[in-house]
Image (spheres, helix red, strand yellow):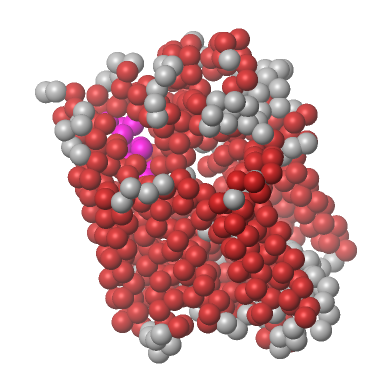
Amino acid sequence: MDARPRFMPSGLTRHQRRVYGAVTIFFIVVFFALMWPVYALFSGIRPIVLGMPFSLVYLVVILAASFLVLLGVFTWEGRAEGGPDEGDGRAADGPGAQDGVGRR
Amino acid sequence: MPDWVIILGVTLGYLLASLLVGLASGGEASKTTEGYVAGDRSLGFVILYFIMGASIFSAFAFLGGPGWAYSRGAAAFYILAYGTVGLVPWYFFGPRIARLGRRRGYVTQAELFADRFQSAGLSGLLAVVSLVGFIPYLMLQMTGAGYVFSVVTGGRMPVWAGALLAYGVVLIYVFRSGVMGVGWTNTFQGIFMMALAWGLGLYLPHRLYGGVGPMFDAIAKAAPKMLQAPGLGADGHPWSWGAYSSAVAISVLGFGVWPHTFMKIYTARSERTLKRTIVWYPTFQMFLVPILFIGFSGVLAFPGVHPADKILPTVVTSIGLPPVVVGLFCAGALAASMSTGDALLHAAASVTIKDLWRPLFRPDLAGDRERRLIQGLVILIGALAYTLAIFAHMSLVALLLLSYGFIAQFFPLLCATFLWPRATRAGAVAGLLAGFVVTVIWNFVPVLQWQGIRAGIWGVAANVIVMVVVSLATPPMDETHVAAFVVS
């Protein structure tokens, strides 16, 4: 048996692989950006934005960016499938999806 | 009429409303185990969104969050940080888990892992660890509910009676309505909590300082270290980056694998519904921002409050708010406790029967009898946790920290289940055991706690190494069986 880990279904198109690859890298970067040493660079009080210390604003911005990226992927998947939002498992593409199942 | 009677009246009104909502939802699912535990896999976006949000935001977030901000400043930001990416793995693994659950009949987390690794022992092990995590968590929620009533009545109602009243209501609707009761009450409680958090979080800085900006300006001048990450430790000295970062990391790993939240994946009506819930979850997470404002509002205005977790009730009851508003706050704190407590209670009973009792002792158990056993256990576990919460004097925080370290050990198992076909039963079990042992040792031997890094992090490292080594040293599992799980 092949001992290599598998991250994406083999049936994805090149474009899909690129998108999911970029999203995965984005969230890995976000994970590390929440901790030392990256967060240490933005851990000060100033500049104060919207009345909040920068150490808090930084996290709020990351939270908002993560939300927007995932929302973008979700919308993109919906458009790619062109199907109803509340289908019965048809929107099954993406890393972790079973090969071919649910695709039109 | 004395203020405390009005406040108590509002709080009891909230309890009654929760009970009615919980009971009314009982007829929505079938009278089967799948109906009771997974809501017949029929939950839509709104209920799932509030189940996820409200069961994650517990009495700890509502009372502990402001307490941390008040006493430890920016250290409290870690609670906001870990939720940012904690649920993201679900976006990728969730649909596959839901699909497997539908095909193979899973309603709990351990059923998935036990099936992938063909091990009833693994199922039992996961169930025991889950229960070790659930009970102290549940005890904390019960004690929190008891405190609310005690504060509301000015000490006239003891903590034990308050906890009994609130969790009597929880027991009734969880017993009768199962996950549907949890879902609808969480929707009601979640809306309540969010409205209250945003209302109070913006109102208190305005009332005490003239706004959020002036509040942080004043704190920056008087106590700048409070606002500089990573904030302060429990001793009042600056917290180490090692402790802060590892708290974020272990919480991210553990966030999505707590069994009581994980099993909600199976309740989703469709994969698209599940993904939509995960996408919108950060909007619930954002409600921690006003929660933190509440704690910061007390830093200069109410110094010396001890324990710090009482800062929210202290502020609310000290600034001359109308009793109805104070009552609403108390109901919000109760909502936070109950919306987590009900999910824990429901999950603890389900896990005990589905993952421990049935696979190890009664493989033929099924149908109506299984559902009734789970219902009976809801009462039994509720009574056990209540008794321990009221009468046992143990360090819940220590137990909770340990259980977080334990639960995070499920994350490598999740990755191995779906991403690594070569992972074997022996590797999975050995990795988990190594993770647990290392977590316990690192937790209790101070000399090993280098840079304040959480014990669970070392446990996860040991878990991964042992799982890989043992898996490679043992024969691979049946390829056809593994193919049903692994991405291919």
- Residue depicted at x 66% and y 79%: B426
Quadrant of the image occupied by residue A46: top right
Where is residue B122 shown, x and y percent of the image?
Answer: 55, 76
Q: Is residue B134 magenta?
A: no
Which image quadrant: the N terminus of chain B?
top left
Looking at the picture, does residue B385 appear above or below residue B371?
above
Where is residue B357 shown, x and y percent of the image?
Answer: 40, 79
Q: Left of B144 or right of it: where is B363?
A: right
Q: Which residues are magenta?
A: B327-337
Name the outermost residue toward the right.
A14
Q: Left of B337 or right of it: where is A16?
A: right
* Nearer to us in this view, B191 or B253: B253
Q: Left of B59 or right of it: where is B159?
A: left
Quadrant of the image occupied by residue B147: top left
Where is residue B371 shown, x and y percent of the image?
Answer: 33, 76
Query: Can residue B63 be seen from the camera position used here?
Result: yes
Query: Can residue B93 be seen from the camera position used here?
Result: no
Quadrant of the image occupied by residue B24: bottom left
- Residue depicted at x 85% and y 66%: A13
- Residue depicted at x 27% and y 64%: B379
Q: Left of B324 or right of it: where is B59?
A: right
> Magenta-highlighted stretch: main secondary structure?
helix
Which image quadrant: the C terminus of chain B?
bottom right
